[in-house]
Image (cartoon, grey):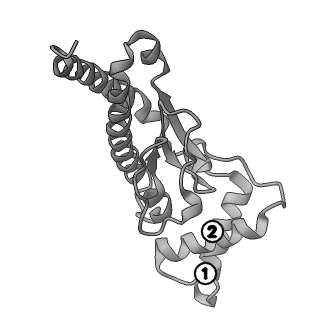
Amino acid sequence: MAKWKTDGRISRNLMPEKFLPSVEGVLVSTGEYGVREMRAREKEQVSSGASGRLHDSIMFVTQAHKSGIGGQAEPSDEVDKPSTKDTVAIGSQVPWAYYVEVGSTKHMNKEGHDAFVQSLKDWYVRAFGKNPDDSENFASFNALYKKIMDEGTKEMPFVFPCIDDITEYAKKMLANAVSMNNYATRGKR
C-alpha cells in the first residue's frame, strides 16, 4: 500500500479543547487536497493513462469522513480508517501501489506469481486495448513480462512528492480554522 498519514496530535496538545472540532474540518480539507495532488501526480507519472484502478482508488479517510473511490477501483482498495480521531490517511491500498511508488527489483519470488501475471494482463488490456493471450499480441506481452521479471520496474512516486505541499496546506488550513473558531467563540465565555 502507498499512503501517507498526518495527524493533529501536536495541535491537540497546544490548543484549547474548543478548537478540536476544527481539526476534523482541517483533516477533511487536507484529505481532499491530498487526493487531488496525488491523483494529478500519479496521472503525470503514469503517462500511458492505463493507471485507472490506482488513480481511481486514491482517497482519504478520517474516523468520521472519507472520500469516495470510483471507476475501476475496488472496495478492497480503500485506505483503512485511522485508529485515532485526529488523523487523516491519504493514498491507495491497490496491491501494486507501493511498487509504483518505490519501484521494484527483478521478480524472483514465485509466491503470488499467478496474481501478478493476471494483473499484468489486466493492465495490458487497459493500456493497449488488446488481449495479451491473442497470438498477435503474445510477443509484445511476453517482452513486457520478461523485462519486468528480469529488471523490475522504475519508481513513479505519487505520494512522497506531495507530502511537503500537503503539510503546508494543512498548516494554513489549521491556522485559518483556529482563527475563525476563536473569533466565532468570542463573547460566549
In percent of the image, x 61 and y 81: which residue is there?
132
Q: Earlier in the sequence, mark 2 or mark 1?
A: 2
Task: Identify the residue at the far front of this view.
Answer: 189
Residue that mark 2 sits on: 120
Residue 48 lies left or right of residue 174; in this view the side is right
What residue is disc 1 on? 132
Q: Position of residue 84 (x, y in %)?
A: 55, 32
Q: Name the secondary structure under disc 2.
A: helix
Which of these two is toward me, 150 or 64? 64
Q: Position of residue 127 (x, y in %)?
A: 48, 71
- Disc 1: CA contacts within 10 A as few (<14), some (14-19) or many (>=20): many
| Cα–Cα gap, marks 2 and 1 | 9 Å
Q: Mark 1 falls on what kind of element?
A: loop
Classed neighbour count for the residue bearing mark 2: other residues with Cα under 10 Å, few (<14), some (14–19), many (≥20): some
Extreme residue in the bottom direction:
135
Give how far across and how far down residue 140 sits, in percent: 60, 75
Q: Nearer the viewer, mark 2 or mark 1?
A: 2
In this view of the protein, which residue sits in the foreground, 57 or 19?
19
Query: On residue 184, which mark appears?
Result: none
Instruction: Name the quarter where the C terminus is drawn.
Output: top left
Q: Amino acid at mark 1?
A: Pro
Q: Are marks 2 and 1 in contact (CB under 8 Å)?
A: yes
